[in-house]
Amino acid sequence: MRVAVDRDKCCGAGQCVMIAPEVFDQDEDDGIVLLLDDSPEARLHRAVREAASVCPAAAIQLSEPDLTT
C-alpha cells in the first residue's frame, strides 16, 4: 500500500490521526495533515483504509498493488 495526502484539501479534522497515529499526524501550526509513513506495514492497512474513508475532505489517497496478476 502507498499513501499520499493532499494538504491543500485537508480541513484539519484530525480523524486520520486518531485512527492511524503511526501513519498520520497534524502540523502544530495549522492542523493540516502530515504523512509520517507513505508505505505502512500490512498490520496498519485496515486503519489507513478507515482513515481514508472517513476523511471529510477526501485528502487521503491510497494505491494498492493488484494482486490478481
Image (spheres, rainbow, N blue to C red):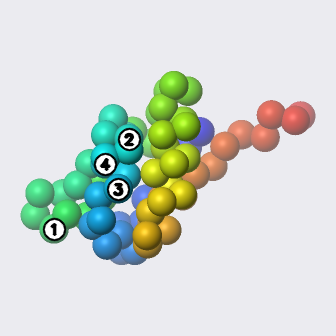
Q: Amino acid at mark 4?
A: Val
Mark 4: few/some/many CA within 10 Å (<14, 14-19, 20+): some
Pointer 3: what residue?
15
* Above/below status of 49 relative to 9: above
Alpha carbon separation for disc pair 4 and 1: 14 Å
Alpha carbon separation for disc pair 2 and 3: 9 Å
Most foreground residue, 48 or 34: 48
Residue 43 pos. (x, y %): 51, 25
Q: Amino acid at mark 2?
A: Ala
Contact between labelled residues 1 and 2, with CB atoms less than 8 Å apart: no
Give residue 20's mark: 2
Query: Secondary structure beneath disc 2?
Result: loop
Pointer 4: what residue?
17
Contact between labelled residues 4 and 2, with CB atoms less than 8 Å apart: yes
Residue beneath the point at 43% across and 70% down: 56
Mark 2: few/some/many CA within 10 Å (<14, 14-19, 20+): some
Which of discs 1 and 3 lies nearer the camera? The answer is: 3
Q: Is residue 35 visible?
A: no
* Above/below status of 32 relative to 25: below
Residue beneath the point at 50% across and 55% down: 52
Residue 17 pos. (x, y %): 31, 48
Contact between labelled residues 4 and 3, with CB atoms less than 8 Å apart: yes
Q: Quadrant of residue 33?
A: bottom left
Contact between labelled residues 3 and 2, with CB atoms less than 8 Å apart: no
